[in-house]
Amino acid sequence: MGEDRAHDERKGRHAPHSVNGPAAVAPPGDHGWLDAAILSGDVLIPGSDGRSRVFAEVGADRDGPVTRHLLTFAADDRTSVRRTVFALLEHLFFQRSGPPSVAGAAEAALTDVDPQVRRTAAALLVSTADPDRAAAALHACSEPVARIALVDALTRPASTRPRPDLNRLRSDPVPAVRLLANVALFSGDDPAAWTRLDTAVRADLDASAGVLDASGSVLRLTAGERWARVLTGFDREGDCYGWVRRLTDSAEKAQVRREGVRMAVEAMRQWRAAPTRLAPVLTACLKEDPSEVRSSALRAVAASLTASRLAADDLAATLDDPELGAPAAVGLGSTGDHRAVPHLVRLVLTEGSRSGDALAGREEARLAKAFRAVARAGADPRAPVAAARQILAEQPDPCAVALPMSVLAAFGPAAASAVPELIAMIRVLGNDTPGCVFDVLGRIGPAAEPAVPLLRQHSTQSAALALLRITSDRAVADRYLAGRPEELRHGHVAAELLTWLAGHGGLTTRQHRQLRSLFRRPGFGQVESAGAVWLHEGPAAAAELLEVLTGYLSDDMRGPEALRVLTAMGPHALPIIDRLDRSTASRRRAGFDIGDWDAEMRADEMLLAASLDARERIAGDRRKAVTESG
């Protein structure tokens, strides 16, 4: 939760509280549900009934019976209960004013016997108390853990509250307090002070490592990460690289070297050149004996596509490592390196033998992307397809088949041997068959012909698209579109059907109107239908397509499709060259908002590569045209 909160704060928004909707208001004094939710920890689980109900009731009355009942647990004898209650209160009143009773409970908890409670209470106090009260609490507090947490909350970049006397805190007896003060003093108005502040931060880095991100910290950023954010924030690229090299030197202590690796991660997330500049530094750590430094360095390399390509042999050398083999395989596989395939297959089989939620969503998505990469690179499909079939045979639950379906979809026609399992799923699940099953059959193509009779029994759009891909029968698309309104407001499948028809005989007048209705509406439908507009209308639509698609070139989701259409337009897309040159020349990464820093970095790497490729192809068409005309 700490990293998610940090990401939300970086993006300038509050962390979501996952309220499912209006919750019934309990009768006054009826708090059995709240007691149960606190004792079970349900109130800290995003999306849970207990948490949603608390947020609904406190939102309706901030100083009402639910808040007052929560405060009765603030001095509970059970440490776990106090941790839960203060964490919940901090979530409820994060960077918002709260009733005086909440601030009072937070201030009293600054002396709690549990460090985690003290940290959370400090953040809660700063969020809910008036500035003078928070400053007085800091002045009166001598306990290091609470003092660090108070300064952390008071100096947080997103905070609008007055800051304490930072120059006074620079001589504080607590090293982590001094570090926080020095980090907060960096300013674009005084670059001359940067070197002095760097030296001061470095002097306290050893003692602050592992302190600021300790369990219970609200914003769990390490000392190195905080320093790196200053360096990246002021675009001090060369300085950041220099500090990474110095801090990761083998002569430094392990905790300092880990901070150096974390600074490298922050640099790679912000600057496009960073993976190339820092991969040699990180791979040097991979050649050492097993340690936390080596592990963190490998994970840093594997998080970046560029760094993974540069360190491919080093990643391959760790594929059999019990701890690091999995991230090494995913990182290597994401670059299309065939050496990762056997290890990716083992990962799929391991996760497939567990429950449907065994893999975290982000990890599963990345593993699926690794398979797509190796499939595009021509990897042997036999072992991955066999593994996916094995999981489908053992785990028929439709909620647990997303990963094997992704594997089969990645290999497309080469996954034809899985058609019997897919047919069996449709027969068992009937109308509850997930769309991914139909999608895989469609990607397999003509070899999935045995599934056609079953597909004809389903009227879903996914089944229609699968039928078209398998049979290449225009009548399938014609029938589906005839049953749809002429004014289409959205529809991924409709866009695909129209694109196929535009490339196989053209569109009817009504279908053309359907296409145009999709293309008029900004969003996925507009980009997905752009290719059909080009195929059907040709150069007459070039100016309009250029105007529309330019708006998607920096979009991580829609940008690649926009670039594909522009590439298909060839010399008619030449006016876009200058725009591509400007975007690819940027030193800093594009500002995506995916919710995962590493995923944002990889999205920028992929979009940058696609932009460079599109630019080369479009410019190549120009050179070809000039040569032919000559």
Image (cartoon, rainbow, N blue to C red):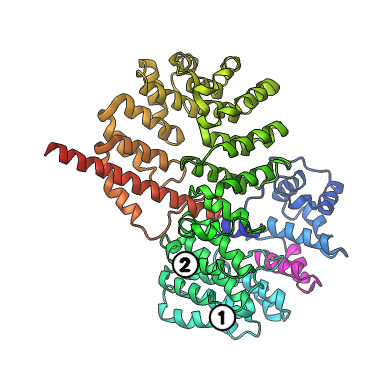
Q: Position of residue 235 (x, y in %)?
A: 42, 67
The magenta segment: 99-128
CA neighbours of label 1 inside 10 A, class few (<14), some (14 to 19), many (20+) = few
Measured Cα–Cα span from mark 1 to mark 2 = 17 Å
Disc 2 element: helix
Amino acid type, callout 1: Ala
Q: Residue furthest left?
A: 630
CA neighbours of label 2 inside 10 A, class few (<14), some (14 to 19), many (20+) = some
Q: Look at the image and say whether residue 108 sits in the magenta stretch.
A: yes
Q: Residue at x 33, y 57 (%)?
A: 585
Q: Which mark is residue 432?
A: none
In the rendered view, would you say 275 is above or below 172?
Answer: above
Q: Nearer the viewer, residue 223 or 44?
A: 223
Name the magenta segment's main secondary structure. helix
Instruction: Give the image quarter of residue 96.
Output: bottom right
Count of numbered badges drawn on the protein: 2
Q: Position of residue 391 (x, y in %)?
A: 68, 36
Using residue 393 as the reference point, say whether residue 415 is left or right of it: left
Amino acid type, callout 2: Pro
Q: Nearer the viewer, residue 404 or 218?
A: 404
Query: Is residue 432 at least partly visible in the picture?
Result: no
Using residue 260 as the reference point, say whether residue 566 is left or right of it: left
Q: Position of residue 488 (x, y in %)?
A: 46, 24
Q: Which mark is residue 280?
A: 2
Query: Is residue 467 at least partly visible in the picture?
Result: yes
Q: Which mark is residue 251?
A: 1
Image quarter where the N terminus lies is bottom right
Instruction: Give the image quarter of residue 290.
Output: bottom right
Q: Residue at x 73, y 67 (%)?
A: 121
Q: Residue at x 60, y 25 (%)?
A: 419
Q: Look at the image and say whether residue 147 sits in the magenta stretch.
A: no
